[in-house]
Amino acid sequence: LETETNPLSVLRQAIRGVTPDIAVKARRVGKPTHQVPIEIGSTQGKAPAICWLLGASRKRPGRNMAFKLSS
């Protein structure tokens, strides 16, 4: 694959784009358990973002992972 831009910066930009800002946590209020949204930091959000990117790229047709990630 030939690119004009740095692939690492493109990957970082993609991770930044899909990183979640909030997550839901189970909180017990009385008897029932409620899903309460909480704010998460960028470090905690990177793991699910990378998993989502890899999962989406695995579903794409293509020859290899580099080709799938680039498309």
Image (spheres, rainbow, N blue to C red):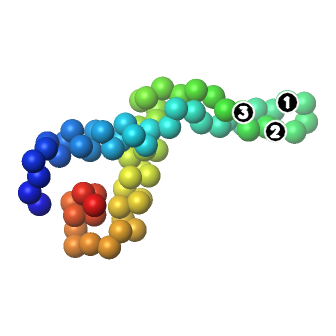
- Cα–Cα gap, marks 1 and 2: 6 Å
Contact, CB < 8 Å: mark 3 with mark 2?
Answer: no
Name the residue nearer the viewer: 58 or 29: 58
Q: Secondary structure at mark 3?
A: strand
Q: Residue at x 26, y 72 (%)?
A: 62
Q: Nearer the viewer, mark 3 or mark 1?
A: 3
Q: Which mark is residue 36?
A: 3
The image shows residue 11, relative to residue 29, as above or below, that is below
Mark 1–mark 2 CB contact (< 8 Å): yes
Of pointers 3 and 1, the one earlier in the residue sequence: 1
Q: Residue at x 43, y 43 (%)?
A: 18
Q: According to the image, label 1 marks what residue? A: 29
Q: Residue 18 shows which numbered tag? A: none
**66 with respect to 57 (left or right):** left
Q: Which of 65 and 31 lies nearest the eye of the viewer?
A: 65
> Whole-percent x and y of residue 71?
28, 61
Q: Secondary structure at mark 2?
A: strand
- Residue type marked 1: Val
What is the spatial separation of the Cα atoms under label 3 and label 2, in whole angstroms? 9 Å
Q: Is residue 47 visible?
A: no
Q: Position of residue 36 (x, y in %)?
A: 72, 33
State the image quarter where residue 23 is shown: top right
Q: Disc 2 designates what residue? A: 33
Quarter of the N terminus within the rendering: bottom left
Q: Residue furthest right?
A: 31
Q: Vertical placement of 53 versus 21: above or below?
A: below
Q: Please tell me in which quadrant of the rendered image residue 9 appears.
A: top left
